[in-house]
Image (spheres, rainbow, N blue to C red):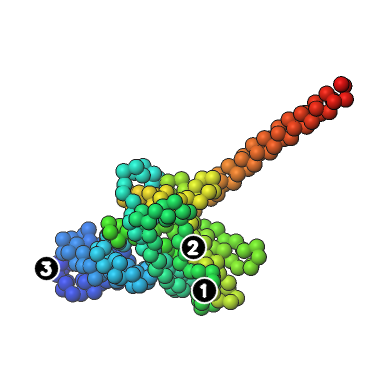
Amino acid sequence: MATTIEDVHADVLASALRRLDGRSLAAASCATAGLRALAADPDTWRALCLAQWPSLALAAHHLSAIPPRRLFADASPFPCADAAAQLTTLLLPENLVSAVDVSYRGTPLLSRVVETPGCSIPWFRGSPFRVEAVDCKKPAPVAPPFSPAELELSWLVVDPARGRAVNVSSGRAAAVGRHWYTGEALVRFAVVLGGCNFETTVACSEEAGHVSEVSLAVEDADGSALSGEGALRLLAAAMEGERRGGERERGEVKARYEAFVKSKKGRKESKARREAVIDLCCSTASAVAVLAFIASVVLR
């Protein structure tokens, strides 16, 4: 008599499922009704979430109402870049929780949880959107040595009231540079949503073994800081929008960032040329006016 997967004891199957990653677990749940029931175990998905995002353990009281499987499905894939379609129909989050994890070659280096006010605070809606997970005045020590270009970052933005989340990090570095004064490495992680760039900057020193800054800011196509209300609208739309995963999408995320940077640079150069032309016209008009005045005085 042939043996099937259903003949294996449920405890053995459950133990095997706990060793799978999220994608494999989701795929296994589609095989049979028995595996679907075992794969729906909240503890299995909770363990997966904590393994991938250790910072969630620091925010357990905020996220207890969110089903772990829902949280993993929201946060694991990349959000759809076109997040502007629903901007006019969605309510703004009242409060947000950011779960931030920095890792190096799969080893966690830094985990932080930051609570951010939402639409309930008027000053936040009108101020430039910026969230700091590490204050530059209080650098966070990490274990050296590490290569800044190989750092990985996850920045989960969670709306506890609605039970939705979105990951606004590219995972791997989109760009790496140096601070002009301190010489610290500046590692940038970015996701373009609705034509705006959600960029996280990690400032770190390989020699000193510390991270002095981890901050998230949003800028529009002209490079201007987006307001809190504008960022909340994009985040709400991204939480409700589609998700895309895989290595191909990871490459497209970086390509969209590079296209955004190139477009922003082109806009700045075009603006500078227009301003130069305007300045030249104003200077010419002023010179003509002065010469006309002098001529009228001389010829009297």
**Chain-order first, disc 1 or disc 3:** 3
Q: What residue type is labelled 1?
A: Lys
Secondary structure beneath dot 1 equals loop
Mark sitting on residue 138: 1
Secondary structure beneath dot 2 equals strand
Q: Mark 2 — residue? A: 215
**Residue 207 location in percent, x, y?**
60, 76
**Looking at the image, is 143 positioned above or below residue 35?**
below
Give how far apart the Cα atoms at labels 1 and 2 are.
13 Å
Can you tell which quarter of the image residue 12 is in?
A: bottom left
Judging depth in this view, the residue of 226 and 248 nearest the camera is 226
Judging depth in this view, the residue of 196 and 8 nearest the camera is 196
Left or right side of 190 for 120: left
Give the position of the N terminus as an image quadrant: bottom left
Q: Mark 3 — residue? A: 1
**Looking at the image, is 191 positioned above or below residue 287?**
below
Secondary structure beneath dot 3 equals loop
**Residue 263 location in percent, x, y?**
55, 44
Disc 2 + disc 3, Cβ < 8 Å: no
